[in-house]
Amino acid sequence: MTGLQSVLDPAGAGGASIAALWWAMFGMGTLVFLGVVIALFLAVRRREGTELHTRAGDRLDTPDDRRARRFVIGAVAASLAVLLVTFTLSLFTSRATAALAEDGAPEIEVTGIQWWWDIRYLDSDPSRVVRVANELHLPAGRSVRIKLRSRDVIHSFWVPSIAGKLDVMPGRENELWVRATVPGTYRGQCAEFCGLQHAKMSLMVVVHTPADYEKWLAAELQPASPPASALAVTGETVFMRNPCSACHAIRGTDAYGQAGPDLTHLGRRLSLAAGELPNTAANRAAWITAPQEVKPGAHMPDVGLDPTELEALLAYLDGLK
Ligand code: CUA
């Protein structure tokens, strides 16, 4: 899937602090490495011209010994200084990433599930809560509070361009504050091994201008468009009569399933199966007919539709824009 995923090209306040810390540590690490290589080189050169005279009983306070002792003490002091500076810098980075909290900020609940992300855009009015799978939409320049939950095992939420990484634990709620700065599409992924399809548990992050974000949210709040053709009407019946509607919700219909992704505006999704397939008509068909080939172990079953049912179902799903 398209979308940038880079720790070194940040598009968020937290990501920027972490990238700055990375560059500082990279610079210091490089200097230390060069220092060690130069010291090693000098030591080898000195050694080549001299012979070992030390025997048991020799006194150990020749001028050479005193120089060596001063050098060791200096090297220990330099190591401590380097550790102290990196420790201080990482404290400042932690403070900067924690300082994004803001009263009245939008709240988004992200639930990790084997192997996809259920994302709910919260609102004090429950009828205005929007639910979207595997897509995190953010307004640029605003702090957003992300509540992280897990429905099964430990996952880890990581969108390197925007913010740091945080574990997603069953039975508790972790909180991550993010502030995206540059509109665009970014990629995130689960960063904690969580089973067979851990590597196929990604999410797309779309950063909008604040006005576009409000427009997006208003559009998502709309119920699903009713089927527009006779074939699609049949497809809706296929969806409701088969196990599809037990796992998936489509707002504005009788499908309320919560086990799988909400499909109300399926046509607008960037991907299927948590970033695994681009969202095209052909891929929707492939995912419905052979989910275990696309993502072995996924909880999406092959419900065994006959070709006419499948054609009608796809016509219905194609209309969910
Ligand atoms: Cu979820 Cu790895």
Image (cartoon, rainbow, N blue to C red):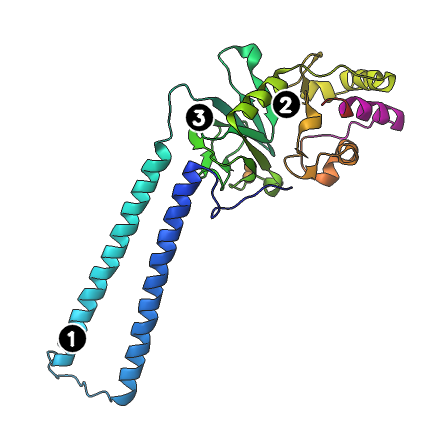
Label 2: few (<14), some (14–19) or many (≥20) C-alpha neighbours in 10 Å: some
Specify whether 300 is left or right of 103: right
Q: 78 or 104: which is nearer to us?
A: 104
* Amino acid bearing label 1: Arg
Q: Image quadrant for the N terminus?
A: top right
Q: 314 or 310: which is nearer to us?
A: 314
Q: Which residue is mark 3?
A: 145
Expressed as whole percent of the image width and height from the top left, the position of residue 100 reads: 38, 30
Residue segment shown in magenta: 300-317
Tag in front: 2 or 1: 1
Label 1: few (<14), some (14–19) or many (≥20) C-alpha neighbours in 10 Å: few
Does residue 1 show up magenta in the picture? no
Label 1: element kind: helix
Label 3: element kind: strand
Q: 169 or 271: which is nearer to us?
A: 271
Residue at image point 46% right, 21% down: 106
Q: Image quadrant for the C terminus?
A: top right
User: Is tag 3's residue or tag 2's residue first in the polypeptide sequence?
Assistant: 3
Q: Seen from this angle, which residue lies furthest right?
A: 308
Residue 259 disc label: 2
Q: Is residue 70 above or below residue 137?
A: below
- For residue 247, which quarter of the picture? top right
- For residue 245, which quarter of the picture? top right
- Report if the CB atoms under discs 2 and 1 are less than 8 Å apart: no
* Amino acid bearing label 2: Ala
Residue 172 at least partly seen: no
